Amino acid sequence: MASDDLDANQGGNKDKKTYHKKATGDALETVKKHSKDDDLKLFGSCFCPFVQRVWISLEVKQIPYQYIEVDVYRKPQSLLEVNPRGLVPALRHGDWGCYESTVLMEYLEDLNAGMPLLPKHPQARAHCRLWSDHINRHIIPGFYRFLQEQDQSKQVQYAEELKTEISKLVDAADPHGPFFLGQNMSFTDIQLAPWIIRLNRVLKPYRGWPEPEPDTRWAKWVKAVEENEYVRATTSTDELYLDSYERYAENRPNTSVLASAVNGGRGLP
Ligand SMILES: N[C@@H](CCC(=O)N[C@@H](CS)C(=O)NCC(=O)O)C(=O)O
C-alpha cells in the first residue's frame, strides 16, 4: 500500500491499525436499511460515539432518515457545508443543517415525532439534562484521559477518577433501574450508551477496565444498555472498535481534534 493511502495517524506505518471506514455487523445492516435518500440526513463515522448517540435516538424514535458514512479525517464538502468545524455527527434536515451531538438529540426531541426521550415534568427534564451535563463534562473527558495516558501510575489515577465520576451518576439514577429513569431507556442513557459499549470493547482490552461488580446497580445498567435493541442496531463488531481506538491507546500524533484537546488539557471539541 502506498503511504498516500495510509491515514495521518499511522505515521507512514502500515502495520498500525487505524479507524474503520465502514460499519460492520448489526450496524451495517442498519446502514443498509437507511441508505435511501431522505430529507433528514445523518452524517456519521461508524466508530464515533458522538454519532452513535444521535443514531440511537433516531432508531428509538423510528424517525425516517438517511445515514451517510463520511471519512471525517478527509472531510468531504457535503459535511463541511453542514458543519464548518468538520466534526461528526452533523444533521441536514431539508435545506437546514446543524451539529453537536447533544444539540442534535435535543432537536430530534423537539420534532415531537416518535417516542419522547425526555420526561414531561420540567424538573424531571432538568434532572436528565443535569446528569447529561455531568456525562459530557466529567465522564467522557475522563474516558479519553485514561485511554490516552501512557504512564502507568497516572493510568491508575485516571481509572479511579473515571470510576468516581461514574459512581456519582449511578447514585443519581433511579435506584431500581435498570436505566437512568427506571424501566425505559431515555435521554441520559443514550448520552452515555456509546461509552458503555466502549468500556468493554476498548478500555477493557487496552487498559484492563474491569467488568462491573456482579449484582450492583451499575452491572444492571450496563447489561440493559448492552442488550437494548437500538443500541445493538447501531453497534458494529468488536474488531471495529479495537482497531479504531488503537491510535488513542498509543496516543499517536494526528489521532483527532479530540485527542489533541485531551493532550493539551483543553475541553473536548
Ligand atoms: N462535541 C462534539 C464532538 C464530536 C467529535 O469529536 N467527533 C469526532 C469523531 S468521534 C470528529 O468528528 N473528529 C474529527 C477530527 O478530529 O477532525 C459532539 O458532541 O458532537
Image: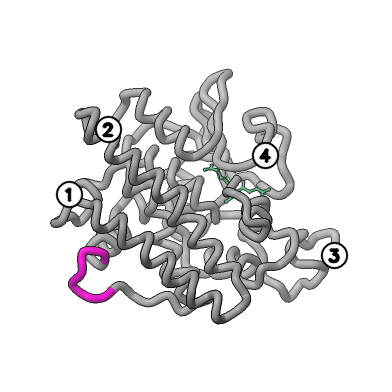
| Element assignment for label 1 | loop
Q: What segment is highlighted magenta in the picture?
A: 213-218
Which of the 4 image quarters holds residue 167?
Answer: bottom left
Residue 134, x across and y down, in percent: 39, 48
Tell me what residue is drawn at x 86 percent, y 65 percent.
2
| Residue carrying label 2 | 116
Specify few, some or many for label 2: CA neighbours under 10 Å numbering under 14, 14-19, or 20 or more.
Answer: some
Circle on res. 86: 4
Q: Is mark 4 within 8 Å of ligand 1?
A: yes
| Residue carrying label 1 | 182
The C terminus is located in which quarter? top right
Q: Could you tell me how far apart the alpha carbons at marks 4 and 3 are, in whole angstroms?
A: 24 Å
- Does label 2 or label 1 sit earlier along the sequence? 2
Q: Is mark 2 within 8 Å of ligand 1?
A: no
Q: Is residue 100 above or below residue 250?
A: above
**Label 4 vs label 3, nearer the camera:** 4
| Residue carrying label 3 | 3
Residue 125, x across and y down, in percent: 27, 34
| Element assignment for label 2 | loop
Tell me what residue is drawn at x 31 percent, y 57 percent.
168
Residue 150, x across and y down, in percent: 62, 75
Which amino acid type is shown beneath numbered disc 4?
Gly
